[in-house]
Amino acid sequence: MDKEKEKPNSPPRLLIILGMFSIQVTNVGYNVVAKLAVGNRGKEGGVNPLVFSFLRDSLAFPLLMIMAIIWDGFRLPRLADVPRIFLLGLTGMFGNQFLFILGLTMETQFVATVTTRFQPVFGSLIAMFIGLERFLWMKVLAVALAVGGALILTIDDILKGAKGVTGILVLLAGALSMSFFYVLQKPIVKKYRPVSITAWSYFSGAASMGLAALYYAPWTREWEIKICKEGIDQHQIAANHTEPGCSMAMWRLDKISWIAVAVAVILNSVLKYILITICNKHATVTEIMMWGTLVVPLGAVADLVILHKQLHPLWAYVGILPIFMGLGLIHYVNTSKKEDVRQILSWQRPLLTLLCGEDAVPKSSLNKGVNSYTHTTIISNCF
């Protein structure tokens, strides 16, 4: 199937933009409910972030599977695609969250907020390096504007400084993990429906998160005391609460926390990841990840309206302008068909073959006298 035949089945461009915007709205909503659950630490302690993520993922998987069976029918992925789908759960559902949570134990929330803004940089670099997208200076400028604007909005966080290099590297690894998720998902979205892909991915993501959450299981009495002391230090367990059974406080959720988990399952796990899968089929990796920078101004507006909390300094609101300039520029790049007029270098063929399969870039597409492959062949076989 060539590109022209695909066009009638593609949704209107406005719907894709609305979908990418909705993803960021769900991100802001998730941040609010996660703060309610993880930050709701009374005298008896609150839910641990890792446990919260495990509960969210493990509850989302069966819900997504039921939805997939109802809408898509009962089906399984091809055996050749199972490793790729497993990696989707490992990078997008587990790696991104786990490394972010781990990074928070080493760094402040301020530094974590700043480092996650580099996801579009990593995603764009990976996509252009392997030949999934064409290198364009306008695209580089668009990413720089959006990321730069997000950094301006978080200038107060940046000035607070970091605790050390290790925490920053862990947080950047989390951002890199999510970038790989978008790239790895590209060839899969052409083969299966969005709900099925999301459900299968969540199986490996929830399983991996479950193994990580077992860290808080009281394997021995000595281990339980260690866990409880960590909980006391992080204000998740009441002071001097180290008697037998104290580690259960890590898994105990009050009413507010359960509501937060339910909202997180519906908003972040189900709605957001289905939207990501749909948008990733029709938008470039660079564009869909650039929309992630919109979380910062949306969060700032939400804080101003709901919490009456302003940014410091006030001139930081200027950062909203370059974000929208960057999004406008990447929209122009994608709608001007500049992605279509390009060639894939021969050294990129093994990378695309590894990502998309042996038939992604057939050797027969080698241009005479030119050591490159046409983009038309790849777009019909890979993304």
Image: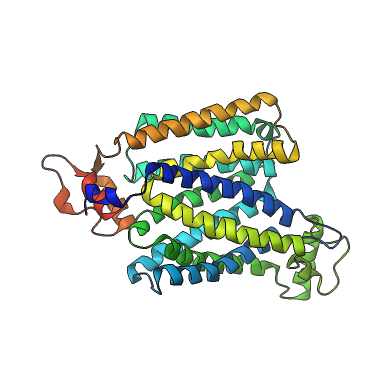
- Rendering quarter of residue 24: top right
- Residue for point 54% across, 71% down: 62
- Rendering quarter of residue 305: top right
Check the picture and name the quadrant holding the N terminus: bottom left
Residue lying furthest top in this view?
A: 315
* Camera sees residue 123: no
The answer to whether 264 appears left or right of 352 in the picture is right
Q: Position of residue 106 (x, y in %)?
A: 68, 49
The answer to whether 379 appears left or right of 325 in the picture is left
Most foreground residue, 82 or 336: 336
Most foreground residue, 353 or 196: 196
Q: Position of residue 59 (x, y in %)?
A: 60, 68
> Where 138 sits versus 3, above or below?
above
- Residue for point 89% across, 63% down: 240
- Residue for point 81% across, 74% down: 245
> Where 74 sits versus 233, above or below?
below
- Rendering quarter of residue 168: top right
